[in-house]
Image: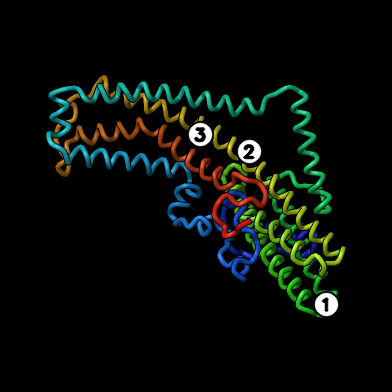
Amino acid sequence: MSGTTDPRSGAPDDDDSTATDDDGDATDDGRAVDGERDATTADTMRERADESRLKIWLLVRANRLVVAGVLTVVVFLAFVAVAAAFSPSLAGKVGASDPIETLFASMITAIVTGATLVVTIGQLVLTQENGPLGDQRQRMDDTLAVRDDVAALTGAPAPTNPAAFLDAILGAASGCARDLRESVRSRGNGDGGPAGTALEADIDDLTADVVENASAVRGRLDGATFGSFDVVFAALDFNYSRKIARIEHILADHDEALTEAERDRLGELRESLSLFAPAREHVKTLYFQWALIDLSRLILYAAVPALLAAGFMVAVVDAETFPGQTLGIDHVTLVVGGAFAATLLPFSLFVAYVLRVLTLAKRTLAIGPLVLRDSGESG
C-alpha cells in the first residue's frame, strides 16, 4: 500500500499514478513491434479498449445505485416526453379505454416473476459456498498453500485483509524487479557489448514497468475496503500478464547474456507476478458473489414499493383521479410515467449490477499472458 515498506527491498512505494482494469488478463506481448517496444500498450482499460471515460464510468466505476437511479429517471422522462408528443393524449386514452390496468397488471406479473428469479440466483450463489466436509477441507488446504507461497515470497506472514494481501504480493514484485536491475547493473554487462547493453535496457524497462504500475496500484489499495469495489478496481489496474510476457521474451532474447543469478531473479519476479494472478482472480470472484448477494437483496427491497405502485395504479387511478396540467402536460401522464418508472426500479438495479459484472468478466476472461484481442503479435 502507499507508504508501506517493500517486503523485498525495504523501499517505500509512494508513486501516485493511475491505472485501470486488465483486459482479458493480457494486454500486449511485451515485445517490440516494428522496432518499438510497448509503444501502444497501456495499463488502463480505457486506453487499451479505446473507450471513453464516460462509458467506463457508467459500466464499471460509478456507484450502482446511482446508475440505477439515472436509468429510472431516464425512463420517466422518456415516457412523459413520448406520451405528451402523441395525439390523442394519454388522458384521453385513459378515459376511452383502460391502458393503465393493462400496463400495470402486466408489471405486477413481471415484478413477482423477477423477484422469484432473483431469489433463485441468490440460492445458486449460496450453493457454491455449501458442500461436503471433504470439499471444504480441500478449499482450506488450497487457500493455506497459496498463503504459504506468499509468505515465502514476502518473508512475512501473509495478511488477512484482501487489499493488504494483494499489496504484499505487489511489494514483493517491486522488490524482485529492483534486485534484478541492480544485479544486471552491478556486473557491468560483461564487456559492455551490444548484447549487454540491450539486456540492461530491457531490464530497466521491465523494472520501471513493474515498479511504477505496482506503486500506482498499491496507492489505490491503501485504505480500500472490500465490498465497495475499490479493492477489485485497484487490483485490476495491475497488468501482470504483459510483464510475464516481457520476462519470457527477455529469457528468450538474452539467453547467452544472462547469468544463473539473473535467471533466478527473473524466475522470482515471474513467480511473484504469477501469484498475483490467482490472488486477484480470487478477490474478483468473491466480489462477484458479494455483488450478486447485494443485488438480490436490493431487488427484493425494491420489489415491495414497486408492487404497491402498480397495485395503486390498477385499483385507484383513472382519468378523473389527477385532473389538470403542469407545463402543458396532463397530471395523469406524469403520474403514470412516475409509477411506470418506479415499477421498473428492480429491473434498473439488475441492469446496473449486471453491466459491471459482465464488463469485468469479459475483461478478465483469460488468466496469464493470453491476448484475447488484436495485439499486433503474430505467430
Task: Determine whether label 1 and label 3 are within 8 Å by CB.
Answer: no
Say which mark, if any, is on residue 76. Answer: none
Q: Residue at x 73, y 58 (%)?
A: 248
Q: Where does label 2 land, which residue?
A: 286
Q: Does residue 20 appear in this view?
A: yes
Q: Is residue 59 left or right of residue 99?
A: right
Q: Residues within 10 Å of mark 3 (few under 14, many from 20)?
A: many
Percent across and percent down for residue 312 are: 29, 23
* Closer mark to the observer between disc 1 and disc 3: 1
Q: How many marks?
A: 3
Residue sitting farthest toward the right = 260
CA distance separating discs 1 and 3: 58 Å
CA distance separating discs 3 and 2: 14 Å
Q: Does residue 234 appear in this view?
A: no
Q: Where does label 1 land, which residue?
A: 188
Q: Quadrant of the N terminus?
A: bottom right
Percent across and percent down for residue 167 are: 70, 53
Task: Determine whether label 2 and label 1 are within 8 Å by CB.
Answer: no
* Closer mark to the observer between disc 2 and disc 1: 1
Q: Disc 1 on helix, strand or loop? A: loop
Q: Nearer the viewer, residue 164 or 192?
A: 192
Q: Disc 2 on helix, strand or loop? A: helix
Q: Amino acid at mark 1?
A: Gly
Q: Quadrant of the C terminus?
A: bottom right
Percent across and percent down for residue 333 are: 21, 34
Say which mark, if any, is on residue 295. Answer: 3
Who comes first in sequence, dot 1 or dot 3?
1
Who comes first in sequence, dot 2 or dot 1?
1
Picture layout, residue 166 above or below residue 261 = above
